[in-house]
Amino acid sequence: MYATFEGDNTILLQLVAKRPLSDYTSELKNVDRAGIGRFISQRAEVLAKRHTPWARLGQSVSDRGNARRAFDSMRGAEFQEEMLADRARIKVEEVALALRKTARMSPADAAAEVNKHQVEMLDAARAHADLVRWRAFTAGIEALEDEGSKAVLTDVRDLFGLTAINDDLAWFLLSGMISTQRGRQIEGDLRRLLWRLRPHVLDLVAAFDIRPGHVRAPIALGGEQERQDEAAAYFRARRASSDAPVSEKAARDAEKRARRGQGRKGSSR
């Protein structure tokens, strides 16, 4: 069990990537003839989506150019899970296939080869983590009994799912997994979800029960207010003293009053 890491989350992501890669490699080693058939079928499906328009065409036919229908389709749990699950599986699979030759290398050469694929490994880890979080959130929603809470949290889930897809939109488009119409309108759909959630934002934040003591920030614990009060008292004392510097604004106002006074004297003569 890993508890803490020094630095950023890169090391943790490497460990996250290692688990599905190890599982995938073990699965391939122990696969039977039927499993080989499934593997070949999956690879053929991936290549077909990339090089033929059938998946995108199916989405376009389903949406029929209607933005509302496309929005409802993308908010469907089936669509989001399919997108996130396929992305995680394909990215893990492609890294695993790229690293197959390391089994025949010396430990030093194998480590060097793994280092060449660090970017892809971290990308696969993030895709895997997005899928795990989406599924956990969906399972939590399904366990709710209150329909109001379920509706709001479904919007939160959809916001997370569509944001994950939008953040990797180029990959989904190039992989043939999402139509250009859906890709084009996803930004607008995210804004629509944000407006739906806007009345519930304070309640959602309050649900975390984050108190000033948890934040431990000076601005939350009163330290910043103490500094502001101290500064205000200092400037009040300076203004009340005889040696306080004259502000630029006060100097300009005094100069204007002096000019107006001289103008009145000249006109009275």
Image (cartoon, helix red, strand yellow):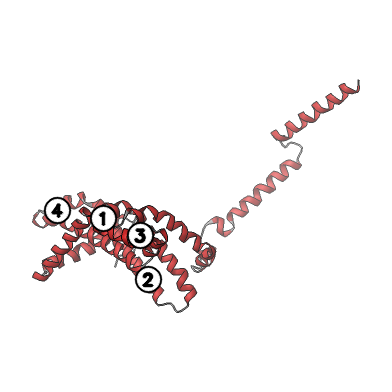
Q: Are marks 1 and 4 in contact (CB under 8 Å)?
A: no
* Left or right, residue 211 beside residue 34: right
Q: Position of residue 69 (x, y in %)?
A: 39, 63
The amino acid type of the residue labelled 3 equals Arg
- Pointer 4 or 3: first along the chain: 3
Residue drawn at (39%, 58%), measured in percent from left and top? 163
- Pointer 2 or 1: first along the chain: 2
The reply to whether residue 32 is visible in this rendering is no
Looking at the rendered structure, the secondary structure element under dot 1 is loop
Q: Position of residue 103 (x, y in %)?
A: 11, 58
Residues at marks 3 and 1, CA–CA distance in whole angstroms: 18 Å
Residues at marks 4 and 3, CA–CA distance in whole angstroms: 50 Å
The amino acid type of the residue labelled 2 equals Thr
Q: Mark 3 highlights which residue? A: 64
The amino acid type of the residue labelled 1 equals Gly
Q: Position of residue 6 (x, y in %)?
A: 34, 56
Mark 1, mark 4: which one is toward the viewer?
Answer: 1
Residue drawn at (33%, 65%), measured in percent from left and top? 79
The reply to whether residue 85 is visible in this rendering is yes
Q: Are marks 4 and 2 in contact (CB under 8 Å)?
A: no
Q: Mark 2 highlights which residue? A: 138
Mark 4, mark 2: which one is toward the viewer?
Answer: 2
Looking at the rendered structure, the secondary structure element under dot 2 is helix
Q: Are marks 4 and 3 in contact (CB under 8 Å)?
A: no
Residue nearest the viewer, comparing 259 with 234: 259
Q: Position of residue 131 (x, y in %)?
A: 31, 64
Q: Mark 4 highlights which residue? A: 110
